[in-house]
Image (spheres, rainbow, N blue to C red):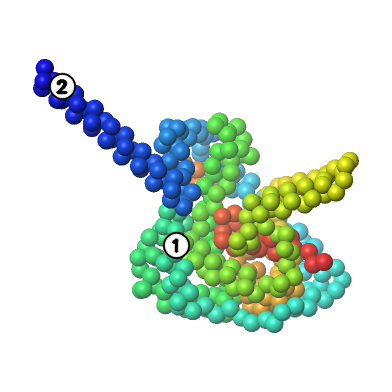
């Protein structure tokens, strides 16, 4: 009997100790700054599991249809002449687009390449070239100088290698049981090397923009977020309502369908020239956005490759910034 009590006590003590360790583990996940750990803790507590998504019957015809559907936006003939191959500044609304700031070309330093390689997120999936971020991060010392030369040569001649522009789209079902090609969401997988290249170009463009940019552009803006937009909206609304009895506020919310896929690169280039970006960088951006090879991957099936000449790939580092500049209207 005494032995039974002793064993039962040790079991109860072990259970309590295991619960304490488990509680400390969850507390650590919630106390960490990363949102990833927070959601992992919530999923652990609630035992949440994502529902299994079904797929339509996957064959070669489906992936080719999806690729055609994702690439169905075409550049209009009226807009293709707005920017010529030599990078000449065109006209917008009948006026010459004069630069607003002093132009200077982008020159990438080896230290910049080392920095972006070292900060690479290795958890992201590899692009069409199959080179994962862990390789570039681990071999930064050996590869930094090589890619510095490649990046600077690309900027000098205004051409992005086709292998850098290539993207593979993973079609993710929007519904548990998709019934048509419109029920799939495209997720672009691009080269890690191009992601690093884009970060360097993005930082340069951001630092070169004039101070006259819209201060209420909260999207795709460093140190700005939807929280800032909501706070500003609430402040403006409540301030107006407090001015007197009977006041009311009307709001209009507009959602652009396939926004990244629809803007015309030639019109974007005119706007970038107007903002003062160097002609060589505008040539590079124009080449980056045109003739991008794209294929779709669903299950074990991969579609044929189609060239894209309109819009910007979703998931690319530069796309959000370029779209916000495309939508910018000078007052």
The percent coordinates of residue 8 (x first, y second) are 19, 23
Left or right: where 179 falls relative to 45:
right
Within 10 Å of disc 2 (Cα), the crowding (few <14, some 14-19, many 20+) is: few
Q: Nearer the viewer, residue 118 or 223?
A: 223
The answer to whether residue 308 of the structure is visible from this angle is no
Q: Residues within 10 Å of mark 1 (few under 14, many from 20)?
A: some
Instruction: Please indicate whether residue 325 sits to the left or right of residue 167 in the image.
Output: right
Tag 2, which secondary structure?
A: helix
How many callouts does the rendering have?
2
Q: Quadrant of residue 154?
A: bottom right
Contact (Cβ within 8 Å) of mark 2 with mark 1: no
Name the residue beneath numbered marker 1: 120
Q: Does residue 239 appear left or right of residue 124 in this picture?
A: right
Numbered mark located on residue 5 in the image? 2
Spatial separation of the CA atoms under disc 2 and disc 1:
56 Å
Residue ID at (23%, 31%): 13
Tell me if residue 1 comes above or below residue 109 in the rendering: above
Q: In the image, is residue 61 above or below residue 326?
A: above
**Disc 1, SS:** loop
Q: Is residue 112 visible?
A: yes
Q: Foreground: 185 or 243?
A: 243
Q: Position of residue 68 (x, y in %)?
A: 62, 48
């Amino acid at each position: 009997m005494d032995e039974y009590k002793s064993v039962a006590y040790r079991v109860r003590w072990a259970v309590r100790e295991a619960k304490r360790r488990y509680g400390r583990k969850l507390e650590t996940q919630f106390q960490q700054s990363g949102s990833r750990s927070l959601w992992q803790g919530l999923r652990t507590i609630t035992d949440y599991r994502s529902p299994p998504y079904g797929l339509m019957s996957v064959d070669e015809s489906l992936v080719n249809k999806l690729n055609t559907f994702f690439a169905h936006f075409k550049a209009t003939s009226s807009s293709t002449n707005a920017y010529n191959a030599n990078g000449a500044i065109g006209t917008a609304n009948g006026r010459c687009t004069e630069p607003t700031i002093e132009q200077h070309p982008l020159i990438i330093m080896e230290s910049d390449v080392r920095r972006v390689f070292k900060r690479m997120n290795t958890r992201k999936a590899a692009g069409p070239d199959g080179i994962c971020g862990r390789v570039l991060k681990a071999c930064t010392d050996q590869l930094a100088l090589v890619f510095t030369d490649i990046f600077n040569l690309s900027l000098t001649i205004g051409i992005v290698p086709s292998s850098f522009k290539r993207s593979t789209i993973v079609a993710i079902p929007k519904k548990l049981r998709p019934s048509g090609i419109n029920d799939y969401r495209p997720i672009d997988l691009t080269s890690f090397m191009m992601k690093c290249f884009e970060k360097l170009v993005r930082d340069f463009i951001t630092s070169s923009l004039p101070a006259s940019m819209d201060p209420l552009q909260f999207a795709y803006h460093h140190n700005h977020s939807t929280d800032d937009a909501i706070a500003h909206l609430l402040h403006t609304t409540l301030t107006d309502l407090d001015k007197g009895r009977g006041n009311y506020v009307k709001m209009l919310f507009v959602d652009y369908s396939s926004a990244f896929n629809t803007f015309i690169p030639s019109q974007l280039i005119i706007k970038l020239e107007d903002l003062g970006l160097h002609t060589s960088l505008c040539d590079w951006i124009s080449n980056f956005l045109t003739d991008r090879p794209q294929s779709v991957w669903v299950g074990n099936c991969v579609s044929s490759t189609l060239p894209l000449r309109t819009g910007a790939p979703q998931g690319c580092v530069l796309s959000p910034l370029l779209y916000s500049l495309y939508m910018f209207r000078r007052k």
